[in-house]
């Protein structure tokens, strides 16, 4: 069986890649992401091949259009700017027909005497949707399966003789987490790009994604995390192929490190009040929650149904570790809540605060559930019946719901921080 899998993987790697022949944007003026001192008089795009039927749209932050009809001059496409652009942020949207018959599109931003916004905040972008919330939740869940199953296997089951069914289920959980995170991450990136480009998928597939992939924290984090997850998947495959544990250790360390990409590209890295401390707290929050929820799933799915002899020892070991993980979740989460929510009333008057309140309630329920396991189930585990397994699955489901609330929070804007009054600023300046 393993030889067959290796042969299929080799065939996939050696398969020839399809050639792309559509037009590629090589440069633009004004350049992407620049802050101009003087307003431009034209928009110019340079491609690597001849194009036809060009369209260039230039929008201000209020949606006012400034571009005249576009024309083709050799490999360049021009559009004159109508009037003089006032100070502000601007969005350029373009479409051309390349020689292979595909419509190529793109979007980028620049500023006139102000900083250019990221493409994800270009005019016309609708922002995260319900579908994106669900996709991000699946992304978090995949990371929890990956990190939680690896940590559970390497820490909670360390030194124990594992039955074959337990090893097989843990391997499947880790593999599903790694591959799922790659695939779901690609879908999440595609949905965000589709929203920014404002194109249906049939045209979006030929879009220029460079400004989003290279010019935003979100894009750079996606690229790094996807490549890193591919390496994690390779390590998991190597551990299964060679039946060695050392690649699993490397996979766990790399997975936890990659999780920092969510913190470095989220609100805790760019919003007011953000700092290296909030980024670190957010990373600790995600990592501890992933190990806790993923470990619960591993215990409930990989050990409890198929290995009665391991139940007691695995439960006791996980219970000790879960206490530390839940403590980290609570401490880091409390600190972040104090930073993100300036006023107590924001918990019920602001959308972000309401979602945070629901998440807090779910975490409290999960902690209470875990407390029941720790103080009542653990002392009598030797006499516990099948009801413990159902209770573990219930606690795991509550943890999964916590991840859902976290996904919605990541895509939500925290309440604005209060602006100091002029008198307060004057007093602060004197001191």
Image (tube, rainbow, N blue to C red):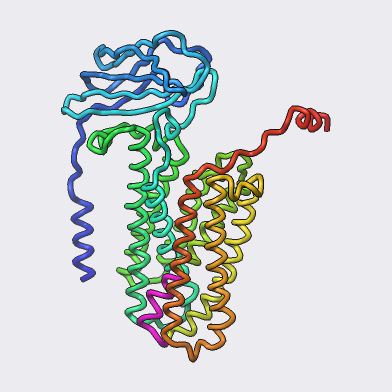
Q: Name the spot of residue 395 as percent of width and height, x first.
A: 47, 71
Which residue is pictured at 35% across the width and 24% down the height? 93
| Relative vertical location of residue 139 with respect to residue 418 in this rendering, above or below | below
| Front-most of residues 361 and 16 | 361
Q: Main secondary structure of the magenta part?
A: helix
Count how many numbered circles sit on residues in the image. 0
Which residue is pictured at 32% across the width and 19% down the height? 56
Which residue is pictured at 34% across the width and 32% down the height? 197
* Residue 69 part of the magenta segment: no
| Front-most of residues 326 and 19 | 326
Q: Which residues are magenta?
A: 296-309
Q: Quadrant of the N terminus?
A: bottom left
In the displayed structure image, the side of residue 96 where residue 32 appears, left or right: right
| Relative vertical location of residue 390 with respect to residue 289 in this rendering, above or below | below
Q: Outermost residue, front direction?
A: 349
| Relative vertical location of residue 261 with respect to residue 302 in this rendering, above or below | above
Q: Name the spot of residue 275 as percent of width and height, x first.
A: 62, 44
Q: Name the spot of residue 359 as percent of width and height, x first.
A: 53, 57
Q: Quadrant of the C terminus?
A: top right
Q: Outermost residue, top direction?
A: 83
């Amino acid at each position: 069986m393993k030889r067959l899998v290796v042969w299929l993987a080799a065939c996939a790697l050696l398969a020839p890649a399809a050639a792309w022949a559509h037009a590629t944007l090589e440069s633009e003026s004004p350049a992407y992401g620049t802050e101009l001192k003087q307003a431009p008089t034209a928009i110019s795009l340079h491609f690597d091949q001849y194009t036809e039927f060009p369209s260039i749209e230039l929008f201000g932050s209020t949606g006012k259009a400034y571009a005249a009809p576009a024309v083709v001059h050799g490999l360049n496409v021009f559009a004159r700017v109508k009037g003089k652009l006032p100070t502000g942020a601007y969005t350029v949207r373009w479409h051309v027909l390349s020689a292979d018959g595909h419509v190529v599109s793109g979007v980028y931003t620049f500023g006139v005497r102000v900083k250019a916004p990221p493409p994800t905040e270009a005019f016309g972008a609708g922002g995260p949707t319900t579908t994106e919330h669900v996709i991000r939740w699946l992304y978090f869940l995949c990371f929890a399966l990956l990190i939680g199953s690896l940590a559970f296997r390497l820490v909670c089951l360390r030194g124990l003789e594992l039955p074959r069914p337990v090893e097989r289920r843990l391997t499947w959980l880790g593999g599903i987490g790694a591959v799922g995170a790659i695939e779901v991450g690609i879908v999440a990136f595609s949905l965000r790009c589709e929203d920014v480009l404002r194109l249906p998928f049939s045209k979006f597939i030929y879009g220029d994604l460079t400004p989003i992939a290279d010019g935003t924290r979100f894009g750079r984090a996606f690229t790094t995390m996807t490549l890193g997850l591919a390496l994690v998947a390779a390590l998991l495959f190597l551990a299964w192929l060679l039946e060695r544990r050392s690649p699993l250790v490397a996979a766990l360390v790399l997975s936890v490190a990659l999780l920092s990409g969510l913190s470095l590209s989220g609100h805790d890295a760019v919003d007011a009040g953000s700092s290296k401390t909030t980024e670190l707290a957010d990373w600790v929050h995600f990592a501890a929650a992933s190990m806790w929820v993923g470990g619960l799933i591993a215990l409930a799915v990989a050990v409890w149904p198929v290995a009665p002899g391991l139940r007691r020892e695995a439960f006791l070991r996980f219970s000790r570790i879960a206490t530390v993980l839940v403590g980290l979740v609570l401490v880091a989460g409390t600190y972040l809540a104090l930073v993100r929510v300036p006023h107590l009333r924001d918990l019920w008057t602001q959308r972000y605060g309401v979602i945070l309140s629901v998440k807090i309630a779910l975490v409290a329920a999960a902690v209470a559930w875990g407390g029941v396991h720790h103080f009542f189930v653990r002392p009598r585990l030797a006499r516990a019946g099948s009801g413990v397994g159902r209770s573990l699955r219930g606690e795991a489901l509550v943890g999964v719901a916590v991840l859902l609330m976290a996904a919605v929070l990541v895509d939500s804007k925290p309440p604005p921080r209060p602006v100091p009054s002029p008198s307060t600023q004057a007093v602060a300046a004197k001191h």
